[in-house]
Amino acid sequence: MTDSPIIKLTAAEIAAKIASGELTAVEVTEAHLARIEAVDEKVHAFLHVDREGALAQARAVDDKRARGEKLGPLAGVPLALKDIFTTEGVPTTVGSKILEGWIPPYDATVTRRLKAADVVILGKTNMDEFAMGSSTENSAYGPTGNPWDLTRIPGGSGGGSSAALAAFQAPLAIGTDTGGSIRQPAAVTGTVGVKPTYGGVSRYGMVAFSSSLDQGGPCARTVLDAALLHEVIAGHDPMDSTSIDAPVPPVVEAARNGSVEGMRVGVVKQFRGEGYQAGVIQRFDESVELLKSLGAEIVELDCPSFDLALSAYYLIAPSECSSNLARFDGLRYGARVGDDGTHSAEEVTSLTREAGFGPEVKRRIMLGTYALSSGYYDAYYGSAQKVRTLITRDFEKAFEQVDVIVSPTTPTTAFPIGERADDPMAMYLADLCTIPTNLAGNAAMSLPCGLAPEDNLPVGLQIIAPAMRDDRLYKVGAAVEAAFVEKWGHPLLEEAPSL
């Protein structure tokens, strides 16, 4: 079962075979559970595997088909869920000791919609604590390995979800993207990851890091699979005040009809230069030539404020994090340390946070609290918000000239575990290309564009579209994917090393 051909099928193929009766949902689920059991000791993509729950969901799908009921486009397809979404009756830790053992009494909207669509949730995936990191090394439960090279990072914060896809433990996954935490892991594992328009996917039940930046989204191995999952989880939710009350863009239709013929594609000069790996730039330049050969017009863009994005992000995100994480006080839920009758409530809170939060979370809380403090608010947080406005305006000007923007997703391929652990600034640079999109609230995708020649590791191509034009990501992404596979083959299916 660990080498079952089922695990190499796309989500769309699995759904079609279940609908036709060629496969049962239980067979598919068992194949993926066997794969997890066989390889996850090495990969450590999962924090919790809900074997009984997944099989129960699969049996329900098979029963529904037996009764002749219509199945949805992803019915019976297994999925790995990032451990930041509350799931009723299943542990949700956010990669932190402060929530170790917490069992939520309710489902996040994303979780609820997955269940309603008969998607089979296999379990919860590893992540940087509270989604703070670019490598999944900040998880309180240990790092995840990149299936291409287990000594290297799978990206972050959603490295568990991306690794599960690349290790064929699940055909679909869910991630969250605050500064690139869906796209950056996708890039370094040779998978597809999409950050929808801010507000396009509900944040209700998603544990908050930075509320004005956080966005859940789909992760998959193909563009069409990502589109099918996007359509399931997206849409207005009255439980989320930032949710957009508008129809979901036609992402599946776009993915089925990929084309760049006549489109204007922008290349931003700020997204290259010092710090970019030669092989990453080589593969990106080849992707631009591929787009040109497919009928796209390439337009050079200058977006000067993008150079300030990293600095602005690391003031805005920590500031919002310091506010959001104030709720973890050891009194209401989660871990509680020092409650032995000899400590005051304030001391219990302090001891709980000291024991429960990891070094990166403490670093960002302190940075954010300082940026919001009296006398520094305008100089730091206020100034960062002004830069955010400039970045948004640069995007607006750019999208007057082009339909989409392309760039490398990450400046480098996956780096070795531990290499940047003592250098936070080097770690933060992993999100250099992804952060501007979060600050502006636009939609963006990363998809594979080959392997870097110097280390034979995956490189990601980032596509950025205007807000609420998520369909453009899939239209361009599908065209690039089809042309790339025809010319060079699919890197994950044909070149990934065996675990």
Image: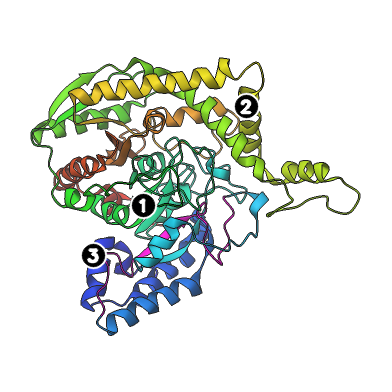
Give the image's coloring scheme. rainbow
Magenta stretch mostly in which secondary structure? loop
Identity, as a three-letter code, of the amino acid under mark 2? Leu
On the image, the x and y values in percent for residue 373 come to: 66, 23
Identity, as a three-letter code, of the amino acid under mark 3? Glu
| Residue that label 1 marks | 497
Choose between 387 and 413: the one closer to the eye. 387
On the image, the x and y values in percent for residue 219 come to: 36, 50
Instruction: Please report the residue visible at 13 percent of the width from the left and 37 percent of the height from the top.
Output: 260
On the image, the x and y values in percent for residue 157 come to: 49, 43
Disc with the residue nearer the chain's start (1 vs 3): 3
Helix, strand or loop at label 1? It is: loop
| Residue that label 2 marks | 367
Helix, strand or loop at label 2? It is: helix
Q: CA distance from mark 2 to mark 1?
A: 40 Å
Around disc 3, counting alpha carbons within 10 Å, would you say few (fewer than 14), some (14 to 19), or many (20 or more)?
some
Which residues are drawn in magenta? 69-94
Identity, as a three-letter code, of the amino acid under mark 1? Pro
| Residue that label 3 marks | 13
Quadrant the C terminus occupies: bottom left
Closer to viewer: mark 2 or mark 3? 2
Magenta span contains residue 273: no
- In the image as oriented, which residue stretches furthest toward the right? 342
Disc with the residue nearer the chain's start (2 vs 3): 3
Helix, strand or loop at label 3? It is: helix
- In the image as oriented, which residue stretches furthest toward the bottom? 67
